[in-house]
Image (cartoon, rainbow, N blue to C red):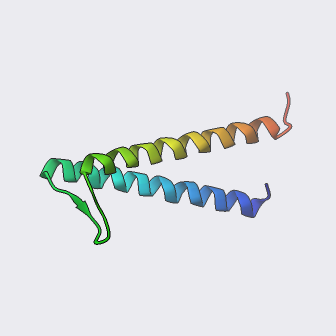
Amino acid sequence: MDRVEWVCFVLLMVFLNMIGIWLVDVGATGMNSGGVLNNGLWTMKPVHGYEAGLLTVMSTQFITALVAVKYIIESGDSR
């Protein structure tokens, strides 16, 4: 991967991670207030939003870690 692809990948992972953190925040707030999440197009239970946020954060962190390990292994710096 060249430098532009790395920057795009990192920005995508940060963006997805922030969406996941936002979903966790909104889901926890909805659970505390006993409400329903609604954006005007669809509604969901706050627990589902919370779980979707957790899965998003965990998957982006896992993918980032796998790519970092792959990069370290393929860097060719053997001592």
Q: Residue at x 27, y 51 (%)?
A: 27
Q: Quadrant of the N terminus?
A: bottom right
Q: Quadrant of residue 63?
A: top right
Looking at the picture, does residue 18 appear above or below residue 79?
A: below
- Where is residue 25? Give x, y as percent: 30, 52
**Horizontally, is 18 left or right of 39 in the view?**
right
Looking at the picture, does residue 47 appear above or below residue 69?
A: below
Total tally of numbered discs in the picture: 0
- Where is residue 77? Give x, y as percent: 84, 36
**Horizontally, is 37 left or right of 16 in the view?**
left
Question: Which residue sits furthest bottom?
Answer: 40
- Where is residue 52? Give x, y as percent: 39, 48
Q: Residue at x 85, y 30 (%)?
A: 78
**Horizontally, is 79 left or right of 31 in the view?**
right
Q: Residue at x 52, y 43 (%)?
A: 59
Q: Quadrant of the C terminus?
A: top right
**Which of the pair 50/6 is nearer the observer?**
50
**Horizontally, is 79 left or right of 24 in the view?**
right
Q: Residue at x 20, y 57 (%)?
A: 36
Question: Which residue sits furthest top?
Answer: 79
- Where is residue 16? Give x, y as percent: 50, 56
Looking at the picture, does residue 20 appear above or below residue 68?
A: below
Question: Which residue sits furthest left?
Answer: 33
